[in-house]
Image (spheres, rainbow, N blue to C red):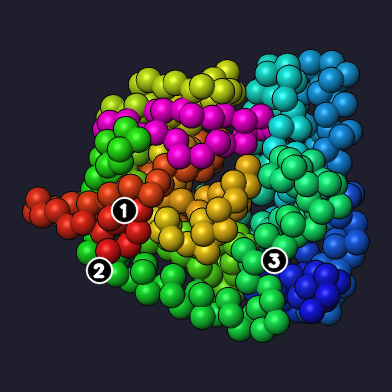
């Protein structure tokens, strides 16, 4: 298969397995102008799958950076209605959403952090209907990546430009299982494997998980009393299966946001808002971050934690074996979409109502009183290392080891 054929296969995987575009459905694609050729392939696939209309929201990280550098503070305080509507309108119409990520992980390094803070706050507020519909799987959505030069150079600094891009595309293709065989069929098998692991943990229905690593993680997290482990394809409210992240290797569930004790140590750098946070620790008491440190990006970490009350609590617990295809590639991607699938992780902020039994029918208030976290943010960070042990603790005080040396037992 040549590069173009792989791209076409990847576009088909995103449309059919990822968003699972239905006949007569509208599709909204957000993508960088740099990847216009790949975008056209996705648009074509979507129409061929029967889309009524495909709307493309083009973005460009360089002009976004200029906006931060030259724009006055007040423009970051709110989002104009017409921009908010470009997503909210389609979310309310139950369109399918495809986001193509992949940018310089440090695109906004040195930007006035107050502008970043205001922008994040205003966006979360403006796009609230869209976020709600996606987080609760009311609409199908899919996030996948495309290679971009600065991102590629961050991963392969030694390589020439063209070589770096080529390597990154290759890495993306392997991570999403694009090769000679039919990727859509391979993903069906992969889904079955993830569903099996979910069933195992759902049968145990642990009350708590205890994490320990030599790096310094010693941490106990309570799981939501009605938690459900999810992984692989999810089912939208209208019964359409879709895969929200390509790739995905995780199974994940909802913690009780009032029960977390101890310290977690980051296992990988985290790119947040175009800045890198590295070598950080978070210490929890009664579910809330009470202390934190970072060797790099402390100020950005502070912005994240100060987003709102829920940003200091956890909304997701995810298990990924250290011996997973992406982890085995030995590449640090500086992109959560990939790095979260190479390591066990947690997420600060909003929980997925789909990881609580009956959660999709609960009001916001019912969710939070039951222990589900509510926040404007949802940010995954990696804690899985080669020496991580995880013990599941049952209601009656039994402890069963489920991870040893970073992998499933
Ligand atoms: Zn996750
Ligand atoms: Zn997450």
Residue that numbered label 3 is attached to = 173
Mark 3, secondary structure of its residue:
helix
Q: In this image, 247 relative to 394: left or right?
A: right
Q: Which mark is residue 203?
A: 2
Residue 400 on image: x %, y %: 17, 57
Is residue 77 visible from the viewing direction of this image? Answer: no
Cα separation between marks 1 and 3:
28 Å
| Residue that numbered label 1 is attached to | 405
Q: Which of marks 3 and 2 precedes in the sequence?
A: 3
Residue 302 horizontal/vertical position (percent): 53, 21
395 vs 340, left or right, is: left
Q: Secondary structure at mark 2?
A: helix
- Mark 3 neighbour density, 10 Å: few (under 14) some (14–19) many (20 or more): many
- At 44% from the left and 35% from the top, the residue drawn is 266
Tell me: 303 left or right of 103: left
Image coordinates of residue 12 in percent, x first then y, are: 75, 74
Residue plotted at (81% across, 23% down): 68
């Amino acid at each position: 298969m040549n590069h173009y054929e792989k791209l076409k296969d990847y576009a088909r995987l995103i449309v059919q397995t990822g968003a699972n575009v239905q006949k007569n459905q509208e599709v909204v694609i957000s993508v960088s102008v740099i990847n216009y050729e790949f975008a056209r392939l996705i648009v074509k696939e979507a129409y061929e799958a029967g889309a009524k209309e495909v709307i493309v929201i083009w973005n460009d990280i360089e002009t976004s950076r200029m906006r931060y550098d030259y724009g006055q503070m007040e423009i970051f305080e709110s989002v104009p209605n017409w921009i908010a509507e470009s997503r909210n309108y389609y979310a309310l119409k139950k369109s399918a959403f495809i986001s193509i990520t992949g940018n310089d992980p440090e695109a906004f390094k040195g930007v006035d952090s107050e502008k970043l803070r205001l922008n994040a706050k205003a966006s979360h507020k403006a796009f609230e209907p869209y976020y709600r519909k996606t987080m609760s799987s009311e609409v199908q959505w899919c996030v996948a990546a495309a290679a971009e030069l600065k991102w590629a150079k961050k991963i392969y600094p030694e390589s020439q430009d063209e070589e770096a891009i080529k390597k990154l595309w290759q890495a993306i293709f392997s991570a999403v299982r694009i090769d000679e065989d039919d990727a859509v069929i391979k993903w069906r098998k992969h889904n079955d494997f993830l569903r099996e692991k979910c069933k195992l943990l759902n049968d145990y229905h642990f009350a708590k998980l205890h994490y320990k690593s030599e790096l310094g993680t010693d941490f106990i997290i309570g799981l939501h009393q009605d938690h459900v482990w999810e992984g692989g394809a999810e089912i939208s409210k209208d019964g359409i299966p879709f895969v929200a992240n390509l790739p995905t290797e995780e199974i994940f569930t909802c913690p009780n946001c009032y029960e977390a004790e101890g310290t977690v140590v980051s296992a990988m750098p985290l790119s947040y808002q175009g800045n890198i946070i590295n070598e950080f620790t978070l210490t929890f008491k009664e579910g809330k971050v009470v202390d934190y440190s970072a060797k790099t990006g402390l100020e950005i970490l502070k912005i994240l934690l100060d987003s709102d009350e829920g940003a200091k609590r956890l909304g997701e617990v995810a298990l990924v074996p250290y011996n997973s295809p992406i982890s085995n590639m030995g590449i640090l991607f500086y992109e959560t979409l990939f790095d979260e699938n190479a390591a066990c992780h947690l997420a600060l902020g909003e929980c997925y109502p789909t990881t609580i039994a009956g959660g999709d029918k609960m009001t916001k208030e019912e969710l939070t009183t039951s222990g589900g976290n509510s926040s404007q943010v949802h940010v995954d960070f990696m804690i899985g290392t080669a020496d991580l042990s995880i013990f599941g603790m049952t209601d009656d005080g039994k402890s069963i080891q489920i991870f040893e040396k970073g992998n499933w037992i």
